[in-house]
């Protein structure tokens, strides 16, 4: 197989062994195809979704969990090639060679072959291309598990009639969250940078879009509170992290839930505990990659049951900014790092 491996050599920030930030680069490498283990499926990968977690891993800030492949990649689409042991006849009935699937991984998706746990696979509907399918597993699993919860454990607990704020509505997670919020019956407010991006987020179903580009955090907060008649929002899905913590708590309604899923603006922030108490609010922090297999299986089962019907009938659609050949992965990463991408970037093999 071919896969994209992080170059272990110390980079020269002025040479070919690093990108413009001085971070190590990914190189195409050849190796034997992985062998599917217990309850795993070997997938011949045609497309791999790109996520900010991949950029963090390449930079050395987000190592894979124990047992996961060392090369990046958290979501793929492709064709079933072989089955590992342990699957019953009923489970394997739909997994004949050549079946189109998409899957969630803990790592190893930047390759033209990958093993995926059976419980983390979903069949690709005829209405989607492989590129579109590869843009979905990580985003749908992340958004569902945070806006709703995992199994019977609520996280955001978003309910019909509540107000959702999506911080960063134009990203890969944000474009999915706006649509899923509407599917759940929420009123959706989102932030985005610039008039053109705001209009595109509005077209995805956001009721209100606040342009954060030329406004201070306090001005954005005032715009959000005005959009809720001063009440605040019930659930915030936040990818910014530390630097946004203070303002996000102030944006919450009584009983509101802040769910932090990213650290684009730092790992540390200041929490006004009195404001949190006065609002009787809560702050949740989650990641998806290192969750136990049973939790990932539960999340993907919910995605298949509750979100895939909307994908099939067009109410929920993948938003793909660009497809990039795998050998040009540095260009794909730059699109995310520089804020160019609207929606997802997908590598093709």
Image (cartoon, rainbow, N blue to C red):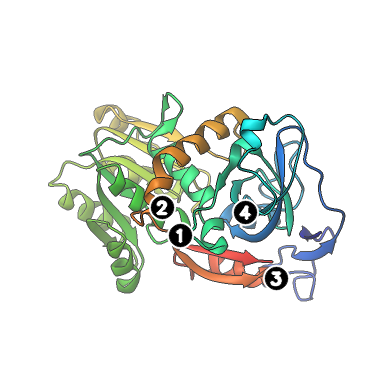
Circle number at residue 311 = 2
Q: For residue 292, say whether it is visible.
A: no
Using the numbered discs, state the Cα–Cα distance from disc 1 to disc 3 in whole angstroms.
Answer: 37 Å
> Which quadrant of the view contains residue 5?
bottom right
* Residue occupying the point 62% across, 54% down: 76
- Mark 1 residue element: loop
Residue that badge 4 annotates:
76
Q: Which residue is more in the foreground, 66 or 88?
A: 88
Q: Position of residue 291 (x, y in %)?
A: 59, 33
Circle number at residue 19 = 3
Nearer the observer, disc 1 or disc 4?
Answer: 1
- Are dots 4 and 2 in contact, CB under 8 Å? no
- Are dots 1 and 3 in contact, CB under 8 Å? no
Q: Which residue is more in the foreground, 312 or 207?
A: 312
- Are dots 1 and 2 in contact, CB under 8 Å? yes
Nearer the observer, disc 1 or disc 2?
Answer: 1
């Amino acid at each position: 197989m071919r896969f994209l491996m992080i170059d272990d050599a110390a980079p020269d920030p002025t040479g070919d062994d690093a990108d413009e930030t001085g971070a190590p680069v990914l190189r195409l490498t050849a190796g034997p195809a992985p062998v599917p283990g217990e309850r795993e499926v070997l997938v011949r990968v045609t497309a791999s979704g790109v996520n900010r977690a991949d950029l963090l891993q390449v930079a050395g800030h987000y190592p894979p969990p124990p047992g996961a492949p060392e090369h990046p990649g958290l979501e793929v689409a492709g064709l079933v090639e072989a089955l590992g042991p342990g699957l019953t006849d009923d489970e394997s009935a739909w997994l004949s060679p050549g079946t189109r699937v998409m899957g969630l991984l803990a790592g190893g998706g930047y390759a033209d072959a990958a093993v995926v746990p059976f419980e983390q696979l979903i069949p690709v509907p005829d209405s989607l291309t492989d590129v579109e399918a590869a843009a979905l597993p990580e985003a749908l699993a992340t958004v569902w598990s945070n806006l709703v919860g995992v199994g019977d454990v609520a996280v955001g607990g978003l309910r019909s009639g509540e107000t959702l704020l999506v911080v960063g509505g134009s990203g890969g997670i944000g474009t999915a969250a706006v649509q899923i919020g509407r599917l759940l019956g929420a009123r959706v407010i989102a932030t985005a940078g610039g008039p053109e991006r705001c209009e595109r987020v509005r077209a995805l179903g956001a009721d209100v879009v606040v342009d954060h580009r030329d406004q201070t955090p306090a001005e954005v907060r005032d715009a959000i509170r005005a959009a809720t008649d001063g009440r605040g929002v019930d659930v915030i899905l936040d990818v910014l992290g530390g630097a946004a913590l203070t303002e996000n708590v102030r944006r919450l309604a009584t009983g509101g839930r802040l769910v932090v899923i990213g650290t684009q603006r730092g790992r540390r922030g200041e929490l006004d505990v009195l404001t949190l108490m006065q609002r009787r609010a809560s702050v949740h922090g989650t990641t998806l990659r290192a969750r136990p297999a049973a939790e990932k299986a539960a999340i993907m089962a919910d995605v298949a049951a509750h979100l895939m019907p909307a994908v099939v009938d067009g109410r929920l659609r993948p938003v793909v900014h660009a497809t990039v050949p795998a050998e040009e992965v540095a260009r794909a990463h730059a699109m995310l790092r520089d804020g160019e991408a609207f929606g997802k970037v997908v590598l093709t093999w």
